[in-house]
Image: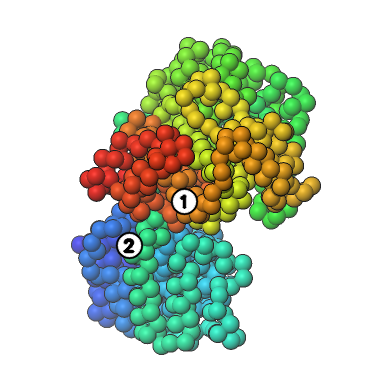
Amino acid sequence: MNDAAAYSVADGIAVIAMNNPPVNGLGNALRAGIMDNLKKAQADAAVKAVVIIGSAKAFSGGADIREFGKPMSPPMLWDVNDQQDAMTKPLVAAIGGFALGGGLELALACSYRIAAPKSQIGFPEVKLGILPGSGGTQRLPRLISAAEALKMMITGEPVPAERAKELGIVDEIVTGELLQAGIAYAKRLVAQGAGPRRVRDMPPKADGDPAKLFQAPPPGIAGSAKGNPAPAEILKCVEAAVTLPFDEGRKVERAASVYLMGTTESKALRHVFFAERQTSKIPDVPEDTPLRELKKAAIVGAGTMGGGIAMSFANAGIPVTILDVSQEALERGMKRIRDNYTVTVQRGRLKQEDMDKRMKLISPRADLAAVKSADIVIEAVFEQMDVKQDMFRKLDAIARPGAILATNTSTLDVNQIAAVTKRPQDVLGLHFFSPANVMRLLEVVRGKQTAKDVLATSMKLGKTLKKVAVVAGVCDGFIGNRMLEKYQQQAMFLLDEGASPQQVDGALQSWGMAMGLFAVGDMAGNDIGWAVRKRRRVERPDFVYSAVGDRLCEKGRFGQKTGKGWYRYEPGNRKPIPDPEVEQLIAAYRKELGLKPRSIADEEIVERCIYALANEGAKLLEEGIALRASDIDAVYLAGYGFPAWRGGPMFYADTVGLDKVLAAIERFQKGYQGGVWKPAPLLVRLARQGGKFNG
């Protein structure tokens, strides 16, 4: 008996019920169970048709991620698909919840497909740098147009069952109890004398001239291909589906699948997949730690950050009070929130009624006493220690016992903030990234006295808000901004030596970063970094900076908000335009330092900036600020525009080879401002041992 795939027969209909929680991943046991039961149904003369079904929440999510990277035992999924094709009785896939990846390939190898309303159908493999490798690229273009098949596979976005029926993937949308509907559908097929209908035998649905279709990805989805080799391989496979017999096309698909599994980009994307799922595992906090109830939230500060955090709660359906000292500030904050939602509605990404529901969940209040009823209070006031401590004294006196008190500080010492309260166990940092309603990263900063249930509750809150929540210890800048400081330091030194802002930004963007560093500074406001540097000079006079950024700010060039920063900006346009004034400013600073500009290769720019991130990340690991190298990667992928196909700064360093990274750092130590390059002891040790950060 195979528990992963239950088998039963009633009234001539065999039912194969998949049972591999949570998503019916097609692991070894489930594949074997399906195969055995298909053979059993084929051999039983009393069986006239077969229904394959999962749970109401999941038909199948595809490959079992618990088996990724491990040896797989036969039967493979394509063996199961071959058995499906060999059946002389109709097979019905009854889809509830979702059929994704290999789960959809299983369904496509059935004769017919029915689905519950709003079920999701899709091939997300491209997001892992791979493709549907069990006939999916060959069967889908035989059911729907090749252009639509390409769109589904290259974007990796699922379609609802209703759209799948329009396209021709699903035969019928059924209501009521799914199993009964599946059995009823199978009985109807038997009554009609319908036999098996093999998708592999259907002619491909080529669109017009195949040559034109396969020259490049269809318009609108070419951007999915940046840095990811999978879209180009999917294109080849669908072209094979349209131009070759099925079995020949499958050979092309198989070769492409094997090739992609071995690419660095796919390994990076798979690393990202697991890294984001690993962040919730905290070694000393058991998974069954009781959680505090969070039914109502309060945000103190109605500025850009506070408003974005309030929107995050409203988007998750959690009532939230937003507070500020003046009615004017509140009205300004609420207008900004309303305007943000309105733009989303205008772009068709949100319905007006959903906007109205979310706006009703946000209550503006000018009286701090309103935090009394909140289960969690998040402070988002000015980034200055005395201001934040003063606010926490007030919150400590007003908030109800057991309420979580969180600071949204991006750099300040959470322990010092907690120390001014009588409940340091209830205090932690929740560092949202701007704009908070859009950015996926949430650094959960654990103070030395933060209670385990507060930490566990906050991590769960991150998931509820659809954030990638990563635990960080207390240090200046936590994980992300502490590393960013080293990245910025090198970028500024590169300007001192001869590079221009546009060359540095261009090199980093060409390498894969979402935005160049100086364009990001202009967007965020160069005055923010300036304020941090002023504080650093007092707290850490040993930290070496180029003063070129200060000179920029002294001229009031704060970025987009002033129309001038590292670049200049036309009114109403955020496109950065190189500015000769900045070149003159940098040239004057070089002259002041007595530096003769040199030609700098893009490769050196990338190495210095990215290796600075990895080296500082290694120090964070040694200090215990970050729990895992993969957590550091998750921070940079979700919050800093690091390219997913590079895997994160630590994974990228692993792919280069830590011995090569160390050799480069030792070379940089001999160059301009070489004293700032101190190789992390962990990097040195691993490089000499042939090890990796993500071991």
Q: Nearer the viewer, residue 432 or 510?
A: 510
Q: Which residue is found at the position 61% from the left and 30% from the top?
A: 530
Identify which residue, 286 or 238, lies in the foreground.
Answer: 238
Asked whether residue 298 appears in the rendered view, the answer is: no
Q: Secondary structure at mark 1?
A: helix
- Picture coordinates of residue 482, whole percent (x, y): 47, 33
Foreground residue among 327 and 89: 327
Query: Mark 1 sits on what residue?
Result: 604
Color scheme of the displayed model: rainbow
Please state which amino acid type lies under the numbered disc 2.
Leu
Which element is circle 2 on? loop
The answer to whether residue 568 is seen in the rendering is yes
Query: Where residue 563 sits: x, y (%)?
Result: 75, 42
Dots 2 and 1: beta carbons under 8 Å?
no
Q: Earlier in the sequence, mark 2 or mark 1?
A: 2
- Disc 2 crowd rating (10 Å Cα; few below 14, some 14-19, many 20+) is many
Within 10 Å of disc 1 (Cα), the crowding (few <14, some 14-19, many 20+) is some
What residue type is disc 1 on? Answer: Glu
From the image, tell me which residue sits under label 2: 26
Per the model, the C-alpha gap separating discs 2 and 1 is 45 Å
Q: Residue at x 35, y 70 (%)?
A: 259
- Image position of 320 with respect to 275: above or below: above
Which quadrant would the N terminus be assigned to in this image?
bottom left
Q: Quick check: 282 left or right of 348?
A: left
